[in-house]
Amino acid sequence: MVVASEYASVEDLVGGTPLVRLKRLPGETSNIILGKLEGNNPAGSVKDRAALSMITQAEAEGRISPGDTLIEATSGNTGIALAMAAAVKGYRMRLIMPANQSEERKGAMRAFGAELVDVSAAEGMEGARDLALAMEARGEGLVLNQFANPDNPAGHFASTGPEIWEQTGGRVTHFVSSMGTTGTIMGVSRYLKAMNPAIQIIGLQPVEGSQIPGIRRWPAAYLPKIFDSRRVDRIMDISQEESEHMMRRLAREEGIFAGVSSGGAVAAALRLSAEVEHATIVAIICDRGDRYLSTGVFDAGPQED
């Protein structure tokens, strides 16, 4: 007789994402450029890993139990991931975000049963984070606080880092990731540097004035507490225009339908590839492109790019 435990649940499918070689964009080079397709996670982004890690650990430590209300400030992917994980594990989820997020993102969160609370675009993520803490102080729920929660990078130390190491057979030489909450780059850096200190960790931040979902240049007072600059060897600035341009090329030339920050990561990987030889460069393709369609970023044709 088949017992229920022999079947996977949705949470069992978080992680284990493919690592694929870019075939056309790199051009003639001795380097190998690889993309880790995090859009293959159940809720569609790399943030599934952190969301599940934060809820699972809080539950294991007795800080939360099914039926509780969780609160989080999020610019999108973390909110979708938390809404999915909360649905799977039986929690109520209240998500606070700037009002200018794409309708696909908001719709996905609502579909998983989350309640959305908007702050103005001017207040931004800083305002959303302040409101989340104020709501917690009023007893309206528990803030998981992805920006200061060590279980965020721990999720990547336990899964994303080991996967990259194993999938490249230990040959990875450079790791490229956008920096928003910074959980991905912190956890992966910690793991890869433990395996080989020579591996170079490259973080991306937007140039001044650029609005790139998932990549932030934080004011000093709001810099994520989980961020340790010593774990990043190099920071590269990326523009919104360059990120969107490469995002569209990824879809047209590699068949990889991803979001804006993924375009930025690949653009940075290609920049890096022009500087090195015989390298194995891994870039995080952090989500899927379908959650950005309503913003019009895919509307430009090849002649406009």
Image (spheres, grey):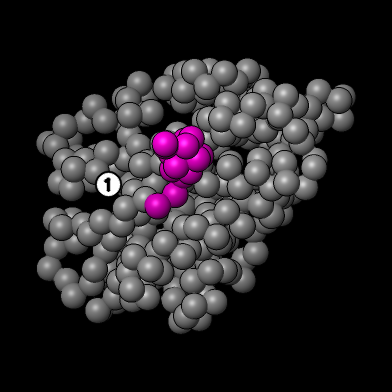
- Quarter of the image for residue 93 reads top right
Label 1 Cα neighbours within 10 Å, binned few <14 / some 14-19 / many ≥20: many
Can you see residue 53? yes
- Picture layout, residue 82 above or below residue 241: above
- Expressed as whole percent of the image width and height from the top left, the position of residue 176 reads 41, 61
- Picture layout, residue 279 above or below residue 158: below
Which of the two residues, 107 or 103, is positioned nearer the viewer here? 107
Residues shaded magenta? 1-16
- Expressed as whole percent of the image width and height from the top left, the position of residue 136 reads 81, 30
Name the residue located 42 percent from the left edge and 37 percent from the top edge: 2
* Residue identified by numbered label 1: 246
Name the residue located 17 percent from the left edge and 71 percent from the top edge: 29
* Quadrant of the frame with the N terminus: top left
Q: Is residue 169 left or right of residue 46?
A: left
Name the residue located 25 percent from the left edge and 56 percent from the top edge: 20
Which of the two residues, 135 or 164, is positioned nearer the viewer here? 164
Q: Is residue 220 left or right of residue 32?
A: right
* Quadrant of the frame with the C terminus: top left
